[in-house]
Amino acid sequence: MKGLKDILLSGERKGCEAVEIYLEEGEVETIEVRGGSIENYDRAKDLGYGIRVLKDGAMGLAYGTNLFEAETILEQALALTSAGEPDSHITFSKDFRIDNPLVKEELATTKGKIEALIELEKEIISSDSRIISVGVTHSKSSRNKVTLLNNQGVEVTFNKGVAYVFADITTSDGKDQRGAWDVDVKRTFEELDLKKIQEGVVKKGISLLGAKKIPSQKITVILPPMEAAELLDALTSVFTAEAIQKKKSVYREQLGEKIAPDFFSLIEDAKHIEALNPLSVDEEGVPTVKTEIIKDGVLNSFLYNLYTASKDDRTSTGNGVRGSYRTIPRVAPLNLYVKPGTRNDGEVIKGVEKGIYVFSLMGAHLINPISGNFSIGANGLLIEKGELTSPVAEITLVGNIKDLLLNVGEVSSELAFMGTVSSPLIRIDEVMVSSQ
């Protein structure tokens, strides 16, 4: 830590108004099995850091992987300020110190993980004779520690840990062939529900055999948690101050207006105890706060980092996020979720007279954030009188995000945090479905 602080002092001596060091240390273990044996194993450690400086109102960022070269990296960052334009809105966090510990250490051994993955593959392939192949079943566990220091009184550390297992299969009944996948994400490997992955991937792969198109129509659509989160993840940018300021959000003129049903709330809360990685500080050293983006159906707030907050004369919501030590902070959620409703998944489905239960979405990331228009491929099962019945495929959900949010009919009570964006199962009415 002393060596890092020496770099801050060196930057001050060289005329910097602000100097910041973002140090990232991580370890990732990846295991892949196929055919009952290990196909690939990798365990890698990584260390990298970025030095960001502010001189004469202009910013420079340089990065490296050898701390003994930090003085050289500082010089590179300083040199870049001469090519930048002064910007009074560039500010660094001030006077905050905290050590945000890892919520839970991983206890599973490498041997235990390998045995669990081989057993999962075995259970999947033996589940049904129509499963003709299992792809690479793999897991990844990562642990990262970030140290953030600047000469404005910030000295913070925070830790992140995540583990996931992914499995995919191919099924065939002799006439039709389908592919399916499933995944679970938790803080540690031992928390993962491998039985749920097995049941999920088998159900999808077998249920989709013989899938047919359906006539174009407006129909109720059920998005399970993973698919609802995927759709919301594609929408997160429209609720950032950066998108609003650049006029790249469909909601740029609607702050304070009703954009969803009264029961619908969209919340950002990095400190939530059940979050994958509860964080009391963001990645530019600002305390995180609970932000109700949509509150009881009303667009209540946008997400801000320090830069966008300065431009709007607001306070940062603690959503300064870095992709890595190589980048400057942008605006993004750390733990965004939809407020749960009152009925469980089964009860929500039982209430649907006619609809589609979606197994997977294709192209959600292509939603136009400015117009809100979307065209998303999907497959799944028909719902008839509250029961899941025949499979459907090669359908496209078409419409506009504004209408989609207003047509949310119900949100399930079952919420599990699986990443930076999470959601319960969601029912959406009057969705236009067209056959491809």
Image (cartoon, grey):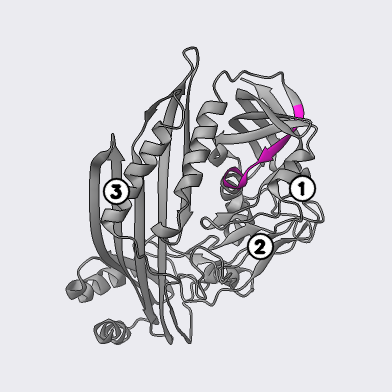
The C terminus: image quadrant = top right
Q: Residue at x 62, y 75 (%)?
A: 315
Query: In the image, is 319 to the left or to the right of 164?
Result: right
In percent of width and height, residue 114 lies at: 29, 49
In percent of width and height, residue 33 lies at: 29, 41
**Residue 31 — which label?**
3
Badge 2 density bin: few <14, some 14–19, many ≥20, Cα 10 Å: many
Query: In the image, is 429 to the left or to the right of 42?
Result: right
Query: In the image, is 285 to the left or to the right of 250?
Result: left
- Can residue 19 be seen here? The reply is no
> Viewer-nearest of labels 1 and 3?
3
Q: Is residue 262 above or below residue 39?
A: below
- 431 or 247: nearer the eye? 431
The N terminus: image quadrant = bottom left
Distance from Cα at disc 1 to Cα at disc 3: 39 Å
Question: On the image, numbered disc 1 is attached to which residue?
Answer: 410
Query: In the image, is 170 to the left or to the right of 244?
Result: left
Q: Amino acid at mark 1?
A: Glu
Badge 1 density bin: few <14, some 14–19, many ≥20, Cα 10 Å: many
> Viewer-nearest of labels 1 and 2?
1
Asked whether disc 1 touches disc 3, contact meaning CB atoms under 8 Å apart, the reply is no
**Residue 267 — which label?**
2
- Can residue 41 be seen here? The reply is yes
> Viewer-nearest of labels 3 and 2?
3
| Picture quadrant of residue 83 | bottom left
Q: Residue at x 72, y 32 (%)?
A: 387
Asked whether disc 1 touches disc 2, contact meaning CB atoms under 8 Å apart, the reply is no
Q: Is residue 297 above or below residue 380?
A: below
| Picture quadrant of residue 160 | bottom left
Q: Is residue 406 above or below residue 163?
A: above
